[in-house]
Image (cartoon, helix red, strand yellow):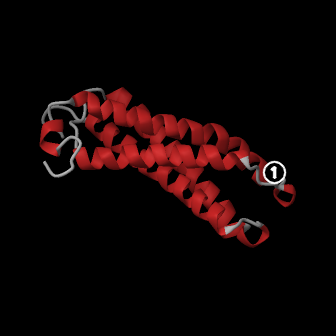
Amino acid sequence: MSGAIIPPNRCASRPKVYWVLLALQTVGAVIVLGNGVPFYRQLVSDFENHQPLTGIIWWAVASGLVMQIAYWLRVWLQPPLPTSGYVVLGHLTAFVARLSFILASSTFSVVFFLRFEQLSLPPHRVFLMLVVLFSLFCWSLELERLAKALQATKGNP
């Protein structure tokens, strides 16, 4: 064994691993969305008086790390997806994935395309925002992957 925690071939027999990693990503996403939506509203409604809060860095770092570690562990371990045949649940999962991606892309648009020169963000905050937005993107990819697996029916993977 060359430093591997759980080799990918052993993980195939552990379907709970998928749910644990998805739950970790989801906890990170809930933290991002719970703190990010009010931030986005304040940024859009009163952009000129926006003052970055110091506490925002800690939840962003924590949630970004949790989401990235869980996502890339899932990619590396390749645990099995749940069985198919849950079409409605699959559609709801795809809907949540798209909504989260809309928030991430609208935040990116406002900050980087419309008002970047008006923001006085140091480079480490810009990097952190990109990490958080990328983490939301990875989570939305994972939700879309799950949605496809849930929507698949016999004979139609």
Q: Secondary structure at mark 1?
A: helix
Three-letter residue code for mark 1: Ser
Position of residue 109 relative to residue 142, above or below, is below
Residue 110, percent from left and from top: 68, 61
Would you say residue 150 is visible in this rendering? Answer: no
**Placement of 118 over or under 66, stated as above or below:** below
Residue sitting at 38 percent across and 36 percent down? Answer: 22
Residue 34 at x, y percent in the picture: 63, 37
Locate residue 87, reporting x and y percent: 31, 29
Residue 24 visible somewhere in the drawing: yes
In this view of the protein, which residue sits in the foreground, 50 or 153? 50
At x 32%, y 43%, the residue is 145
What residue is shown with label 1?
45
In percent of the image, x 68 and y 62: which residue is there? Answer: 111
Tell me where residue 151 appears, x and y as whole percent: 29, 34
Taking depth in this image into account, of 3 and 66 the one nearest to the observer is 3
Is 111 placed left or right of 128 in the picture? Answer: right
Q: Residues within 10 Å of mark 1 (few under 14, many from 20)?
A: few
Left or right for 7, reference 41: left
